[in-house]
Amino acid sequence: MLIQLEKINKIFYSKNYKNAFWILHDINLKIDKGEFIAITGPSGSGKTTLMNIIGLLDRPTNGSLKIDNQEILLSMPEKKLTEIRSQKIGFIFQSFNLLPKLTSLENVLLPTVYTKSDQKEKQKLAQFILSRLGLSERINHKPPVLSGGEKQRVAIARALINDPEIILADEPTGNLDSQTGQQIIDLLKKLNKEGRTVIIVTHNQAIANESDRVISLLDGKIVNDNKNIQFPKELLKETNSNPPYDVIEPLDSKKEMNI
């Protein structure tokens, strides 16, 4: 079990503590290594808060969280949480979250600040990842001159620089056109096939349908947790042209029936 949440609650209180606002309510969730998961739900359902708790960007009010069999204590110092994040989790955001005054290469290298790795080796790795993502000609360009798709690929390269087991993507196609968005989803699926666990937060049902498992939230609660059945495109094409079942012709009342 890579990620395990038990009875996770997230509650905000009013200043006088007279009112409580439940953002997440009694969340129980198990995620295995190598899964490709979509977390869906309407605005305000708690899906981004859930992702932030899994990604150690936010703390639950109470409950138990384990990542790779390591219990994440509510009292754990922020420095320790940062260390775990940098080792195990890569983030991709809808708004890219790139620093505009840094080049693509410098943005990708930002997460390595929190590691003790050799910076020269990390720089070579960053160049390799950017090239693999089709950005070899944009390594020294800054975000303002990049297209939306290029910015998101830089963000994906940044998520990969520390070779994390988990990739968390919050509406990764939200600011992209449909064609570029599909390219990003295809890239995430490829990374998943390489062994990484990918969790996407989305309100787009078409994107959710491409995942292996869909977790639906409503009012801070999990209301659905279903496996998706993926059919090969070739099979779907064959099915559309030649249905794999007997077609029953409608009864023609004008024809005589012999009984």
Image: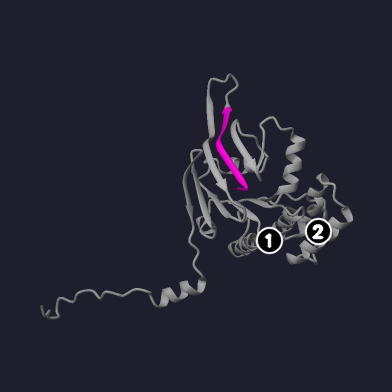
What is the number of the mark on residue 258?
none
Asked if residue 102 lies in the magenta stretch, the reply is no
Q: Position of residue 166 (x, y in %)?
A: 66, 51
Q: Amino acid at mark 2?
A: Ala
Would residue 39 appear left or right of 223 to someone viewing this image?
A: right
According to the picture, the residue beneath numbered tag 2 turns out to be 126
Q: CA distance from mark 2 to mark 1?
A: 18 Å
Tell which of 152 and 201 is nearer to you: 201
Q: Residue at x 14, y 80 (%)?
A: 255
Q: Give the secondary structure at mark 1.
A: helix
Residue 140 is at least partly visible in this image: no
Asked if residue 4 lies in the magenta stretch, the reply is yes
Q: Residues within 10 Å of mark 1 (few under 14, many from 20)?
A: some
For the record, the magenta segment spans 1-12
Colour scheme shown:
one colour
Q: Position of residue 143 (x, y in %)?
A: 77, 55
Q: Amino acid at mark 1?
A: Gly
According to the picture, the residue beneath numbered tag 1 turns out to be 149
Residue 56 is at least partly visible in this image: yes
Q: Residue at x 74, y 57 (%)?
A: 157
Where residue 176 sits, quadrant-wise, is: bottom right
Q: Position of residue 31 (x, y in %)?
A: 58, 48
